Amino acid sequence: MAITLSDTDRQMLAGDRGEAARLAMSILVRMAEVLEADEMMDVTQAHIDGCGLLSDAGLEFAETLAAKGGKVVIPTTLNMGPLDLRNWRQFGVDEDFAAKAIRQGKAYTDMGCIPTWTCAPYQGYLTPRFAQQIAWGESNAIVYANSVLGARTNRYGDYIDICAALTGRVPRCGLHIKANRKGQMLLRLIDFEPALLRDDVFYPVFGYLVGLLAEDKIPVIEGIPATVTGDQLKAFCASAASSGAVALFHAVGVTPEANTLEEAFQGGRAEKAVEIRPADWRAALAELSTADQDAKLDLVVLGCPHYSFAEFRKLTELIRAAGPAKLHPGVELIVITSGSSYALVERTGWLDELTAFGVRITLDTCVFHTPIVHPRTKVVMTDSGKCAYYCPGELNVRVALASTGNCVRSAVEGRVRREDA
Amino acid sequence: MARILKGRPVVPGSARGEALVLSEPLCFWGGYDVATGRIINPRHEQAGQIAAGRILLFPRGKGSSTGSAILLESIKGGTAPAGIINMRTDPIAAVGAIVADELYHRSLPIVVLPEESFRSIGQGDHLLIEPDGTVTVNPD
């Protein structure tokens, strides 16, 4: 199957714009064949996920492109990296690991990538606009950009992201095309108490459930209140993209391509309709949590995706409410965030309170990519569905998902207070 | 007796090996251990099984975009599956395989089979994958 290439595509493929662009274009054209796209198209912004995992192959790929003189041709942000560039020593990260991580990051910034170092780039700088054609990696950000912002990206895996950034081109297919963004299945929330739908803890669990139900289809959801917050949708996106392969969802009356049910389906019909009831939500909550009630707690992780300013405010209020109690000895509480959120938090008085309680904040990174979780850690709590989902496999721990409030309560008591206890 | 199944060659190539059939979608990141070539997501029904050197079947991909990085690293390290067969194209696995080919001239074939053909392959079947997407089950 022959793909139609523009003159610029051909020039890049011939090496006229340098070796890095040639290699990038070669990979992109092969992906176009995989995805059965007829032609390439422009994207005007990229977000790199490939800078996250520190691996020999990943480092080699990045350094190869940088050494070949690769320079991004569109504004390109970076996902969280394998290192808290500011604080890694305080977290006991190995020097050799840090040196390699710094090299990997430098390869990307040498290519002109912007050092945002966050998995929530939609809550920092360069937020894409509605219908903007972008090439984003990072599963949670892909869902958020497509669904909440109405920008257009496919589910790009690591390394195709930098190829798109170096060329400004991607295969024209999938969610870049409006007609492919129509809803495919209908999910209706039935019999939920409004109070639960306003509660932050609803969203990471609901996202996990939707990921399992929708798989890689486009779900249209009826029943999410119009007052849902950006952070709640962030948690939902992160979970749905972990338990499933969701890249786009529509929430009627909430997301920009779904003012009405009909708009969400673009006039078409749902392939299937599923009702979700509170018992389904409770079952999902139970599935996500593998740690027992009252288990000795070792670590609380907050900030997957990176905590926002608003989430820091909520955490500070919870810690004040717990006062004068502090973090239980033997329990660690780590909050992961972006430099941009942290910079705002620094302007408040909260850091002193958080530190006095025992909170440790790490920037620009991810507990799954940077070695800051102590090997003796056995039991983790989190308010993140994504974190809960990956903890057992990635960290070899038992995990409980609970509201931020219950995470703080558990951190004070030193024992797991399950959400469903 | 040999059976011949026609598939779409997502990443063309040849491979031969024993089938490891996963009943659920797979995310390589958090699901595949680069060091041992095992399926490690404890939520997965086939957790603990060795996929390295086998033909790995999973219906489709899911989860983290870092999956391609894990697949690339396992191809580099020699702990990757010998080949992959899906029911639906996994763009994340495909990128990993394509980049491995470009960087190391070493990769693995990925084939998409129609559902009925995919489900006809049993655990432990011997499989031969060919560059045109043909999958022969229990070749003579």
Image (tube, rainbow, N blue to C red):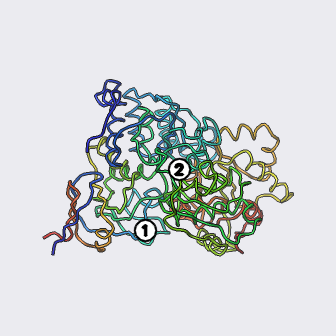
Residue depicted at 61% across the width and 69% down the height = A289
Point out the residue furthest to the left here.
B140
Q: Secondary structure at mark 1?
A: loop
Percent coordinates x, y for residue A217 in the rendering: 48, 59
Residue depicted at 70% across the width and 70% down the height = A418
Percent coordinates x, y for residue A178 in the rendering: 49, 46
Amino acid tagged 1 = Glu
Residue A389, located in which quarter of the rendered image? bottom right
Q: Residues within 10 Å of mark 1 (few under 14, many from 20)?
A: some
Relative to residue A365, is residue B111 drawn left or right?
A: left
Amino acid tagged 2 = His
Image: A400 above or below A156: below
Residue A188, located in which quarter of the rendered image? bottom right
Q: Which mark is residue A330?
A: none
Q: Chain of mark 1?
A: B
Q: Chain of mark 2?
A: A
- The residue tagged 1 is B24
Circle 2/circle 1 CB separation < 8 Å:
no
Q: Are marks 2 and 1 on the same chain?
A: no
Q: Secondary structure at mark 2?
A: loop
Residue depicted at 61% across the width and 42% down the height = A122
Question: Split into 4 quadrants, where in the image is the C terminus of chain A?
Answer: bottom right
In the depicted view, which residue is nearer to us: A84 or A252? A252
Residue B4, located in which quarter of the rendered image? bottom left
Percent coordinates x, y for residue A296 in the rendering: 68, 69
Label tally? 2
